[in-house]
Amino acid sequence: MRVSYKWLKELTGLDWSPDEMGERLTLSGTSCEYIESTARYMDNVVVGQVIELSAIEGADKIKKAVVDDGTERVDVVCGAPNVAAQQKIAFARVGARLVGDFVIKKAKIRGIESFGMICSERELGMSDDHSGIIVLDDDAPVGTPLVEHLDYDDFMLTFELTPNRPDSMSAIGIARDLAALASIKLRRPKFDLTEVATPASDSIKVSIDDPEACPRYAARIIKNVKIAPSPWWVRKRLLACGVRPVSNVVDITNLVMLECGHPLHAFDLDRFGSDEVVVRRAHDREKFSTLDGREHILDEQVLLITNGKSGVAAGGVMGGLNSEVEDDTTDILLEAAYFNPSVIRKSRRKLETVTESSSRFEKGADPNGIEYALNRAAQLMHELCGGKVHAGIVDCYPKRIEPRTIELRPARCNAVLGTNYLTERMKQILTDLELEVSCDDPLVVTVPTFRPDLEREIDLIEEVVRIEGFDSIEDSVTNIGPLFSRTLPEDQFAREARWVLTACGFDEMLDHGLGSSRVAKLFNPDLPQVRILNPVSEELDIMRNSLVPSALAAVSHNLAHRVLDLRLFELGKVYFAGSGDTDWREPDRLALTVSGNTPQGWRETARPFDFYDLTGALRRLVEHFRWPDFDFVPDKVSFLDDEISFRIKSEGRAVGWAGLIAPDQARTLGVKQPVLVAEIDLEGLIDTRKDRIKFEPLAVYPAAPRDLAILVDAAIPAGEIIECVRSAAGELAESVEVFDLYTGKQIERGKKSIALSINYRSRSGSLSTEQVEEIQRGVVAKLEQEFNAEIRDK
Amino acid sequence: MSPLEEVARLRQEALERISTADSLASLKEFRVQYLGRKGRLTAILKGLKDLPVEQRKQVGAEANKCRVQLEQDFDVAERRFSEKSEAPLIDPTLPGTAQRVGAMHLTTQVIEEMCGIFYGMGFEIARGPDIETDYYNFSALNFPPDHPARDMQDTFFVEGDRLLRTHTTPVQIRELEKQKPPIKIITPGKCFRNEAICSRAHVAFHQVDGFLIDKGVTMADLKGCLVAFCKAFFGEGLKLKFRPSYFPFTEPSAEVDIQCFLCGGDGCAVCKRTGWLEILGCGMIDPAVLEMTGHDPEKYTGYAFGIGVERPAMLKYRIDDIRLFYNNDLRFLRQFV
Ligand SMILES: [Zn+2]
């Protein structure tokens, strides 16, 4: 919301600078976002006069004007439709800096030299009106700076308001806070209302069908108004608050709303269609056109102001096209009502619009501020539009909304804040905020209805501290709370997994967790999806059910930027819907992704990443967390390549998958190079592991290492061979490792050579060469028997 | 003497000669004595075939090791004497053997740093689901139904009457339901807002929320805690500014600005010339929240705060596009290794 600085000065009598006002308000909860001078685009802009106007050959939209700017006469090219000879106008000299930092320079347009610009309101940053140039009064003195002539050196303070403070949506509301900050009295505008004898109730009756939705509806009648532009002081004030002036009657309703925060609506009484106002819920499918020209089909959510037959306004949101004030309007029905905030919220949603009026009612207007608003506006219509104010307010207010009374215990206030405020100071602050305070302990505080947000003691405590300022609270320097903080197992797990995997050379990636239903379906057609009902885009319309699409998206992004070698991991959630309130699951997962080549260096040669880079890292995790070994069971996973596709099992339980992404799947995400992934479900794997380490006494007796190279059928898994060796050698085989693997020209097709190093050791004594030889023979025999192995080297 | 011992003695002897040699000529002579075609070590190597199989392997390995070492040592020693030095043995400007480790994601690092600071103050971590109910995300946090406060957070709604949490504050409710005061918890995690993705906004972001509930907790304690945190996270000597604000679940509520650590408060492009950066929201836990979770607000008070993760990281590292936190561009990730 924007408010004029001069207006705030007028309402408070404070001589604070705009910056000081902004800062003090910000520090008391009314956040001043920026401060702009109303005249920021008026340097070098003066009152000028169009001396003569002539056509430019070959151009029908632009004309050549000779302008007197008080010091000289210059040629100016002007395209405004309303420019005319003898007019006094706002003239920007060469050098003026206008809206959008547009600097006026000497220019040549259609062969005519132009030395300046005749300005519209938009060019001078006054409003967004660009329909024509500003035409000044005939007696405006040529050559006078425009700011001076218009008395336009004001500032616009723009506030970002929190939704709990409807009271600060007005100049008076903001001035009230300023007054409290300075401990002075607010200077409310004073006026005497001039009424004629005829009672307003002769012209109009009011009834409310739904007093829950509309607790109060009040109206005044003002007749014989003459619609015209508002005087400059009204327009100026509106402009400085960012509101576009329209005509006197409408401007007055806006001005009063900006002043006291209560929205008003002026109907043309002759077009109103009856002599009664009936406030009711709209009927289902009832049609209604708002004054912005849109036709709506309503339902019961919308509160409709009617003339007893049909709608004339969407209550609290927008007036109707049928009863709008127009240039020939003479008689006014002026409405001021109080609507239930949540009714307005639903209503404006149904109408898909937010207006100055709806946002005030939605946050909570003052039901008892209606008299002021009506009287103030009526008096202005009398003064500025020549209207006759008929006697009295026609008021339908079945159940008066009374001010609330709250108690505030001074000790409680200090206990919550950690302060030592004096009771007297608390009292003063609350009084300065125009609350009524009596008694001392507790303070009994009567809260006027313009502060609907103050409902409880804590709300008053907040009032005290926001005016006194948070700086008045001394920062505590001691630590309080429990003595011991635990660490969640999943956090400890994640922390260690990150250490392990980054040490393995994997970079951590992180996805937002939203995914595309299309891609998810492609990858895991059988997995259920959690749909987002109001997605930002089709590509982000579900919560992901696998980390794989995220991983592939990351690969795709990097490949598109020519980063081809990737080793990534992600620790993240996937999401599964439950039935009703139960079984919603967000299991933690781990994904490993490799693609491209290993790093190339002066000591190492790059090679393509492959499946074993995944299993190597997984093995490191298994080792670190003391998990049982993973088994990789060949099995077709929907998005993996036929040849390289495995289920990962831990003690027989499926915990994930690993393999090569099927190339056609990868290509749908624009990835053309091989990508290998493993995805592990961490549920059941994250429980703490370190305590599983059991210390083994160091070996006392020497080891007897033996190497063994065998030739076997290429299809025989190395794991089975190792298992066979272990079972043949028994517990004397301390370790069995593969140290070489060869397939190729040197050996028979369909065979592989596998070299094992076996470390024999006994815990009870030195093994003799003969003992070792005997076991080794047993091993060889078993290998020959089980795998038809051919011993290459003993 | 066993062949193994012989190798060992020979090595010992040769090394001593290398280290005591006083000329290039004598070194060359020694080299022939040990490693020449009729050298002593060569003889041992040649004699291997006569040894039993078991010994052959072991001795062979040892003798070969010895040969490689001696060759190297002779090379080094001879270079000591050669007049014009050739290329130096070591080029220290070459990068050492690559030890390629991965980078943790910046978001992880910032969360770890923040949580570490709070852990040191006695906070422990609690977590909750990303997909929440209206009750935990709004109602229990004192957002009235159909209230403009709900517009402060653009919400993603999910089938099954759920939503994506818009802050990690729901975890506060979940913990309040489970525990008895004193409770001192931080809740790091992902949150979601239905916003168009651009350089300044994303559909997801991270937050570290925290709260303390005990007897006699005051706003002064809250201020002290946050001042200490900011000192640890942003650096010493930066002023904080507490501005009253509004959150439905705290009262009084405040937003906290920190003196811009890039310009020291003088005003720069990052702080939009104000000298201040908005970094967190906080307040005293609203009595309604305590009541709703079965705690007596007359007996207990508490404070709560919420800190964004990406925003301070963006300020600290001067990152100008929040999308970098989610597109997993290796050129971004590797900068934080
Ligand atoms: Zn700065």
Image (spheres, grey):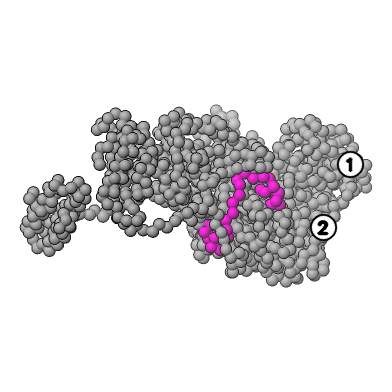
Kind of residue at disc 1 = Ser
Question: Residue B129: x and y, percent?
Answer: 61, 47
Viewer can see residue A69: no
Q: A409 and B122: which one is in front?
A: B122
For disc 2, the neighbor class at 10 Å (few under 14, some 14 to 19, many from 20) is: some
Task: Choose between A68 and A125: the one closer to the eye.
Answer: A125
Dots 2, 1 in contact, CB < 8 A: no
User: What residue appears at the point 88 percent right and 46 percent down from the top-left corner?
Assistant: A396
Amino acid, disc 2: Arg
Query: Viewed as shown, does residue A512 lie left or right of A357?
Result: left
Q: The numbered mark 1 sits on a residue in which chain?
A: A
Looking at the image, which residue is at 29% across and 29% down?
A749
Reply above or below: B286 against A80.
Answer: below
Q: Is residue A3 left or right of residue A749?
A: right
Question: Relative to B41, is A63 above or below?
Answer: above
**2 vs 1, front mark:** 2
Determine whether the residue tagged by mark 2 lies in a helix, strand or loop.
strand
Residue A603 image offset from top left, x and y in percent: 28, 46
Disc 1: which residue: A207
Relative image position of residue A225 (x, y in whole percent): 83, 42
Nearest the viewer among B300 and A147 is: B300
Residue B262, image x, y percentages: 49, 57
Q: Is residue A425 above or below residue A244?
A: below
The magenta region covers B114-143
Give whichever of A166, A783 is nearer the camera.
A783
Give whichever of discs 2 and 1 has the lower sequence position: 1
Q: Secondary structure at mark 1?
A: strand
